[in-house]
C-alpha cells in the first residue's frame, strides 16, 4: 500500500525511540518454497520490508525498529516492533 512507504525503518536501539509509543511486535515475510527460484534475494528482502511497512501502517504506527533478518533458503522473514513517533516540530 502506498501510504506505508512513509514508515521509517530503524535498526537496533535508536535513542529517538524513547520518545515513541510501542504499538506491537510484527513479522514481515516474503517468499515460498515454490517461488524462490524466480525471485532474487534483493526482491525477497524488499518484499519482506514492504510487508512489514504495511503491517506497521495498519497498526497505527509510523516507525519500525528491526531486528536482524532471518534468512531461509526459500524466503526472508523480518521481526520488528511498530512504534508511533510524534512528528518533530520544525522552525
Image (cartoon, rainbow, N blue to C red):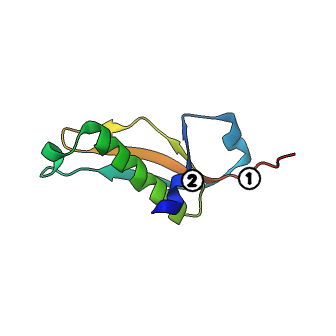
Q: Are marks 1 and 2 in contact (CB under 8 Å)?
A: no
Q: Residues within 10 Å of mark 2 (few under 14, many from 20)?
A: few
Relative to residue 25, is residue 44 depicted above or below?
above
| SS of the residue under disc 1 | loop
Q: Is residue 11 left or right of residue 30?
A: right
In the rendered image, residue 76, in percent from the top left (x then y), is placed at: 30, 43
Nearer the N terminus, badge 1 or badge 2?
A: 2
**Extreme-right residue of the structure:** 91
- Left or right placement of residue 39 versus residue 42 in this view: left
In the rendered image, the quadrant that contains the N terminus is bottom left
Q: Which residue is mark 1?
A: 87
Q: Position of residue 29 (x, y in %)?
A: 33, 51
Tell me: 9 left or right of 48.
right
The residue that appears at 54% across and 34% down in the rendered structure is: 12
Residue at 74 percent across and 52 percent down: it is 87
- Check disc 2 and report its element: helix, strand or loop: helix
Relative to the observer, which residue lies in front, 3 or 8?
Answer: 3
Question: Badge 1: few (under 14), some or many (20 or more) residues near its Cα, within 10 Å?
Answer: few
* Label of residue 6 in the image: 2
Q: Quadrant of the C terminus?
A: top right
In the visual, does 73 lie left or right of 52? left
Question: Looking at the image, which residue is at 39% across and 44% down?
Answer: 78
Camera-side mark, 1 or 2 = 2
Looking at the image, residue 67 lies above or below residue 48: above
Q: Residue at image x 33%, y 38%?
A: 70
Instruction: For marks 1 and 2, give the CA distance.
Output: 12 Å
User: Residue 36 at what x, y percent from top left?
Assistant: 17, 45
Amino acid at each position: 500500500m502506498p501510504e506505508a512507504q512513509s514508515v521509517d525503518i530503524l535498526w537496533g536501539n535508536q535513542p529517538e525511540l524513547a520518545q515513541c509509543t510501542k504499538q506491537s511486535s510484527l513479522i514481515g515475510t516474503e517468499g515460498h518454497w515454490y517461488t524462490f527460484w524466480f525471485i532474487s534475494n534483493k526482491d525477497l528482502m524488499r518484499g519482506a520490508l514492504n510487508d512489514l511497512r504495511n503491517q506497521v501502517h495498519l497498526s497505527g504506527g509510523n516507525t519500525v525498529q528491526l531486528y536482524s533478518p532471518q534468512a531461509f533458503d526459500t524466503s526472508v522473514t523480518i521481526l520488528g516492533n511498530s512504534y508511533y513517533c510524534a512528528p518533530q516540530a520544525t522552525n
